[in-house]
Amino acid sequence: MTPASEHTEAVEALLHENRHFPPSAAFAAAATTDASIYAEASRDPEAWWAEQARTLAWERPFTTTLEWEVPFARWFADGTLNASVSCVDRHVAAGRGDKVALHWVGEPEGDRVDITYADLLVRISQAAHALTALGVRTGDRVAIYLPMIPEAVVAMLACARIGATHMVIFGGFAPDAIADRVLDADARFVVTADGGYRRGAAAALKPQVDDALRRCPEVAAVLVVRRTGQEVTWVEGRDHWWHELVEAQPERHEAEAFPAEHPLFIMYTSGTTARPKGIVHSTGGYLTQAATTHRIVFDIKADTDICWTSADVGWITGHSYVVYGPLSCGATVLMYEGAPNHPEPDRFWDIIDRHGVTIFYTAPTAIRAFMRWGDDYVKKHSLKSLRLLGSVGEPINPEAWMWYHTLIGKKRCPIVDTWWQTETGCIMVTPLPGITATTPGSCTLPFFGVVPKILDEQGHEVPRGGGGKLFLKNPWPSMLRTLWGDDERFKKQYWSELPGYYFAGDGARFDADGYLWVVGRIDDVLNVSGHRIGTAEVESALVSHPSVAEAAVVGRPDELKGQALVCFVTLKNNFTAAPELKEQLRAHVAKEIGSLARPDDVRFAAGLPKTRSGKIMRRILKEIAAGGIVKGDTTTLEDFNVVAALQAQEE
Ligand code: WTA
């Protein structure tokens, strides 16, 4: 792990940011909450969370709020509920069945469907029956590998309805990555599609699943949505068409309630080892925080807002702010299947105007891409329906923040820069619109009950202004409960850095006003275009290629992607460094993990810089990758010639 002090320079630059944007009087006057909420919630955060939890539909009300045996938390544990009932049935029962739950927009123009809460309930009920007919039982894991189509939401909520734990795998993952996840979670059922649309073409999905399942003989059934009409190969007895099986099922389904701690879903994410971690989320605590943060952070007016979170449901942002947050609030979600630049780079702005989107939540990497495509694409559209903007996934650079504020928000919309993680489940640090003055680049203040601490290498609190490692002190309702099947790894990964504190893996600091600035990962995780990629995962993919002897992967700052993937590779004796081999290695990593992990740069080296004890000195490689001269301490370096050779190659 790199010391947090390395990030000091980057933070230093950010801290010169002194622009403040107080909430506008007009926004504040109409906001659903005011500043008194801080005092109210901080008096007794646990009691406050219990009050929020009671806004969900409980079958058996809970009587306990939090049981905390570090690091295992149980929230509302003696209560029972069904997440799909809280997200859908209760809105229908309250007479809001005709309200649109999903405005779905396909990538091909004109391809769209509006689904009301009543329609959604029917679709979920039928899918729940279908899953049961395939043999799915409460407690089973179901893998979902789908494009951004309504069936993704329906499948997630149908699993929730029958108490099956869903595990959504992002559609960009390659067969091996799918198989690793299916095997780790021991999932016996898969929901997929023939394909999905991306940049004007139909991209196939089922072949990836077919390929992955060769390694997963326990998978008993695959439910296949027909989206593109592509040819598919069919395994008789295992594969079933969604439109044949689901649409033939009864339209009503009696939902059963499950304990609050029942695992709602597993979401795999990259960590410091090659094996991805199965983050386990609960039902009651997770849903409480998803609903509450959605309502408060996005200032939701459920009757009129149209909320668009541009993330894929294959990531945590999609889970919490495309599905569980907005639906539990009874809001209307806009869901878009495809690329932001199809058919033209103004597709997002066209969608916003056409559908009257009021709340738009996206990632800095997307904002930087829009900036690059040029202001003219934005100026063609009025964007007058927008009233609030959000950012998530990586630190937002002040230039991108200002562009978002000026060009998209027309200086009228507050921006909520929200810091959180797959592990935290929901938003943790964020401004509150209408209340908190914002500063470009800072995610500002913790949400209620969240206690961030900046600590140094010795575990001492760093005074305001100083950089250190970001920890969280108190438990929160949507915190991960464990890593699937591996409590020990859960303890070691998150709770061993400083016993009793959750280690976030990020470097950060508080400024003089007590605002939090998160600078980025300080473990071996890279953030490439908002996607978390473990360097160890890429290294292990590289060494699985016959030509590679040793590999080290580091991040290089990248204007568009945040970080770019740079791989240093030493070759086995009988292979020669050649441009074609670089291409082969890039393709190999994409094939092993998925195109999201395709290296930006592969560099051949005769040797990698190592300490005398044989540890690869990544700090040096990072400096070389960034094109800089190696400055830091190299006294532990075993062979300085290695560095000289690598640098010479750069020039
Ligand atoms: C980074 C995405 C700065 C951070 C919800 C974190 C951020 C990782 C922000 C989690 C933000 C997320 N400012 N950094 N507003 N939001 N990050 O698990 O490094 O995909 O640890 O969850 O993204 O990424 P993950």
Image (cartoon, rainbow, N blue to C red):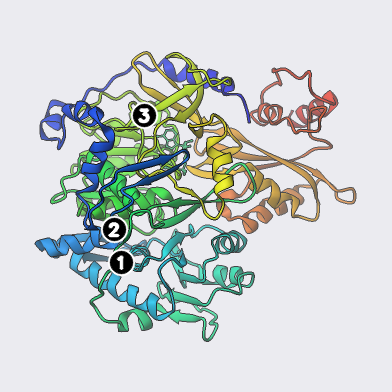
Which mark is drawn over residue 443?
3
Q: Is residue 270 visible?
A: no
Which mark is drawn over residue 600?
none
Report the residue at 31% width, 84% height from top.
248
Which class describes the residues within 10 Å of circle 3: few (<14), some (14-19), or many (20+)?
many
Disc 2 residue type (three-letter): Thr
Residue 400: give x, y in percent of width and height.
39, 31
Residue 148: give x, y in percent of width and height.
39, 60
Q: Secondary structure at mark 2?
A: strand
Which quadrant of the figure has residue 590? bottom right
Residue annotated with mark 2: 80
**Of label 2 and label 3, which has the lower sequence position?**
2
Q: How many marks?
A: 3
Report the residue at 15% width, 64% height from top.
92
User: Is the C terminus in the top left, top right, bottom left or bottom right quadrant?
Assistant: top right
Q: Nearer the viewer, residue 537 or 129?
A: 129
Q: Which of labels 3 and 1 is toward the front?
A: 3
Q: Secondary structure at mark 3?
A: loop
Residue annotated with mark 1: 111
Judged left or right of residue 404, residue 641 is right
Q: CA distance from mark 2 to mark 3?
A: 34 Å
User: Is the N terminus in the top left, top right, bottom left or bottom right quadrant?
Assistant: top right
Q: Nearer the viewer, residue 527 or 464?
A: 464
- The quadrant where ligand 1 appears is top left
The yes-or-no answer for disc 3 within 8 Å of ligand 1 is yes
